[in-house]
Amino acid sequence: MNFYLLFFLLIIIIGSVVSYIYFMREKKENLKAIEQGICPKCHKPTMILIDQRSTGCGGPKLLTFECQECQYVNSFNVNGGSCSSGRCG
């Protein structure tokens, strides 16, 4: 009985990890296309940045992009850079 439960949990964990890796790979490909201004859904050069938020100096940024053609919307967390001078600006 315990062997089946352990086997089931192992299958669930492996499936979750594989799904997460696949999701992150697809997200990375979408970001590469969006950086070039191309919509990953309709493949037209109609992507614009509609929102940009930051947690402060040097923190990660949340960027939200939207396609003006098909209304595809996606958000990405990217590194905000560093503040080597000690000031934001």
Image (tube, grey):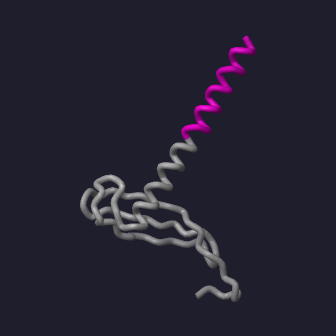
Q: Residue at x 37, y 58 (%)?
A: 73
Relative side of 42 to 22, left or right: left
Relative side of 75 to 13, left or right: left
Q: Is residue 42 magenta?
A: no
Up the image or down, 15 lies above or below 28; here it is above
Q: Residue at x 63, y 26 (%)?
A: 11
Foreground: 32 or 1? 32
Please identify the dominant SS of the magenta region. helix
Locate residue 70, reporting x and y percent: 26, 56
Up the image or down, 55 lies above or below 85; here it is above
Up the image or down, 17 lies above or below 34; here it is above
- Residue range (magenta): 1-19
- Quadrant where the N terminus sits is top right
Relative side of 76 to 10, left or right: left
Locate residue 2, reporting x and y percent: 75, 15
Q: Residue at x 29, y 65 (%)?
A: 45
Locate residue 81, reporting x and y percent: 61, 75
Please identify the residue farthest to the left as the structure is shown.
Answer: 69
- Quadrant where the C terminus sits is bottom right
Relative side of 86 to 26, left or right: right
- Counting labels gives 0
Please identify the residue farthest to the top as the structure is shown.
Answer: 1
Q: Residue at x 30, y 57 (%)?
A: 43
Identify the image quadrant of residue 21: top right
